Image (cartoon, rainbow, N blue to C red):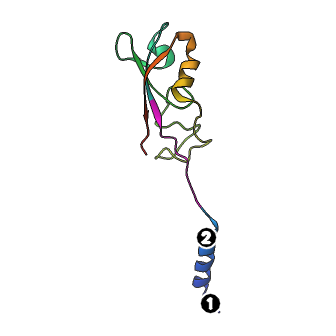
Amino acid sequence: MASPLVSLLLIGICCLALVQESMAVCCATKEEVTFTMERGNCKDVGGYAVSRDTCELLICADGLAQVGMFCGRGSCNVFGCNCDGGCLEGDWSRTFAERYEIYGVKVIKVNRMSPY
């Protein structure tokens, strides 16, 4: 009869063989959007002025200003992965422009920033 340690190792190896792949979804990507507005001011959409006519803002995929360090629906680990509820979804700057159409937002430049 095999020792209990060998049996446990064999069971562990079999379990690992059944797990094909483990992948954590990370929500650390954000976009820096440079834009102009026909009405209102930068703060109305969560941004800040970089010149008299130009605003900037960090957004998540849902087109809203980034809150905190990551773009998860809920809390994330320190690397921005395994966020409760997954990542915020949308079409980034396009969603931003549509969301704030009432202010006449025109996107000038987009810089998608991903740490990976």
User: Regarding mark 2 in the picture, which secondary structure is present there?
Assistant: helix
Type of secondary structure dominating the magenta stretch: loop
Question: For the point 56% across and 14% down, which residue is it?
Answer: 101
Mark 1 residue type: Ala
Of callouts 2 and 1, the N-terminal one? 1
Residue under the point 53% across and 43% down: 76
Residue farthest to the top, as pictured: 39
In the rendered structure, are the residues bearing label 2 and label 1 in contact, judged by CB atoms less than 8 Å apart? no
Query: Where is residue 86 drawn, in percent x and y?
Result: 60, 42
- Which of the 4 image quadrants contains residue 47? top left
The local crowd at label 2, few if under 14, some if 14 to 19, many if 20 or more residues have their Cα within 10 Å, is few
Q: Is residue 63 left or right of residue 109?
A: right
Assess disc 1: are there few (<14), some (14-19) or many (≥20) residues with their C-alpha within 10 Å of its C-alpha.
few
Q: Total of numbered circles in the picture?
A: 2
**Residue type at numbered disc 2:** Ala
Disc ID at residue 2: 1
Q: Tell me the quarter of the image containing the N terminus.
A: bottom right
Classify 12 as above or below 86: below
Q: Which residues are magenta?
A: 21-31
**Residue that lies at the very extreme toward the left in this rendered image:** 51
The residue tagged 2 is 17
- Identity of the residue drawn at 61% across and 85% down: 4
Q: Position of residue 95 (x, y in %)?
A: 57, 24
- The local secondary structure at tag 1 comes to loop
Q: CA distance from mark 2 to mark 1?
A: 21 Å
* Side of 85 where 46 appears, left or right: left
Horizontally, residue 25 falls left or right of residue 50, namely right
Q: In the image shown, does 79 or 14 lie closer to the viewer?
A: 14
Residue in the image at 49% along x and 37% along y:
70
Disc number for residue 26: none
Q: Is residue 87 magenta?
A: no
